[in-house]
Image (spheres, grey):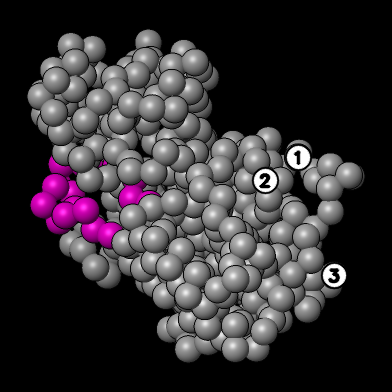
Amino acid sequence: MPSLFVPLAFRAPGGGLHENVRSQCLAAQRNGWRVVLACPPGDFANEMRAQLIEVVDGSLDSSEIIERSIALGPFDLIHAHPFAARKLGLLLADKFSCPFIITIHGAYTDDIDQYHHRTSCIFAVSVGLRDWLIRETKVPPIKIVVAPNGLSNEILQSELPPEKKIVENSVLVACRLDKDKRNLVEWIVESWKLQAKEEHLAKWRIAGDGNIKSDLECAATELFKDKRDDRVKFLGWTPSSRMFDLFRRHSVVIASGRGALQATACGASVIGFGAVGYLGPVNSSSFTQAIYSGFGGLGSSPYELGRLWSDVKELLSERSSSPDLKPLVTAFFSQAQTDKIHQAVYEAILSGSSPRQLA
């Protein structure tokens, strides 16, 4: 059986990155691969062990995890993810003289100009990200294959229980709150200032955590004062299964990437954004842009002052008339299709196909 080594680095305990890698590993396992995952210790590592994936957990830049990973080799293929995981993956690819693949998940280069010549394939999670990499790096376009985030059967088949109702005037923010999301935090604070001035009754729920969460907490206290507990609640990290329920229960969902895609599939009124742009409301007229950007901000118009609050108010007033985009997202974002793309690339690389034959 062929063996696949998947190194993954992350700061947050959960999110779209974890779901992408979970799907990747389980699909490879179903297709007869031995899969070894290297990642930080915690709930995700334990979950993957429960799925019978071999896991090496620890600090990915430590000598211990390097030695433990090497001891589990040799490997036929390395499929890495960015940053510390990419460095570990390249080290093992050199050690075992095996092909190296990386998935780029967002608008960052991860120093790819320094090692793209060592890659057999580079996955991008959207067409917009592929185009951005072509503009911003020296990667040959022929090496980049688009493998979008996909929707699982779990979310496509789930529904809001009949005893639960959509909370009126509710806005859910589903996002990591780390420094690379600074733009969103600033837009939210701007929106709260306008809301406080207008005395609007919108209720915000923040599902996420990170090193700039405190900025939102301070702003909520300052702007809403004794009304803070009614206007803003911080939910922390929330398991995916509960997020589906939250998507359906809130009038408006603000999210990026996989989160925005899932919320759209749940029938929510969604506002999409990314690290480099603002998509705005996802509807029938903006859906092609959502597909292009992977429900992020790539290729979108620059953010205009006050636009988030304007869009939130408009969607709150139009909740009953929100378009059902589930058939569209189901057609374009199938996890099964993304699994096939990964598997086809793996098999082509092992058979000696060139990047040109993969595209």
Residue drawn 76% across and 40% down?
Answer: 158
Mark 1 — residue?
158
**Residue 175, above or below 59:** below
At label 2, the amino acid type is: Phe
> Where residue 36 appears, x then y in whole percent?
33, 20
Circle 2/circle 3 CB separation < 8 Å: no
Crowding at mark 2 (Cα within 10 Å: few <14, some 14-19, many 20+): many
Identity, as a three-letter code, of the amino acid under mark 3? Ser
User: Could you tell me which residue is drawn at 21 percent across and 63 percent down?
Assistant: 137
Secondary structure of the residue carrying tag 1 is: loop
Q: Which residues are magenta?
A: 102-121
Front one among 286 and 305? 305
The residue shown at (57%, 38%) is 239
- Do callouts 2 and 1 mark residues in contact (Cβ within 8 Å)? yes
**Residue tagged by mark 3?**
320
Instruction: Determine whether label 1 and label 3 are within 8 Å by CB.
Output: no
Alpha carbon of mark 1 to alpha carbon of mark 3: how far?
20 Å
Q: Is residue 120 magenta?
A: yes
Q: Residues within 10 Å of mark 3 (few under 14, many from 20)?
A: few
Image location of residue 172, percent across then percent down: 62, 60
Which badge, 1 or 3, comes first in the chain's sequence?
A: 1
Q: Which mark is residue 244?
A: 2
Q: Position of residue 100 (x, y in %)?
A: 23, 35
Quarter of the picture containing the N terminus is: top left
Q: CA distance from mark 2 to mark 3?
A: 19 Å
Which numbered disc, 2 or 1, marks the residue that appears first in the sequence? Answer: 1
Secondary structure beneath dot 3 equals helix
Q: Position of residue 143 (x, y in %)?
A: 29, 50
Q: How many marks?
A: 3
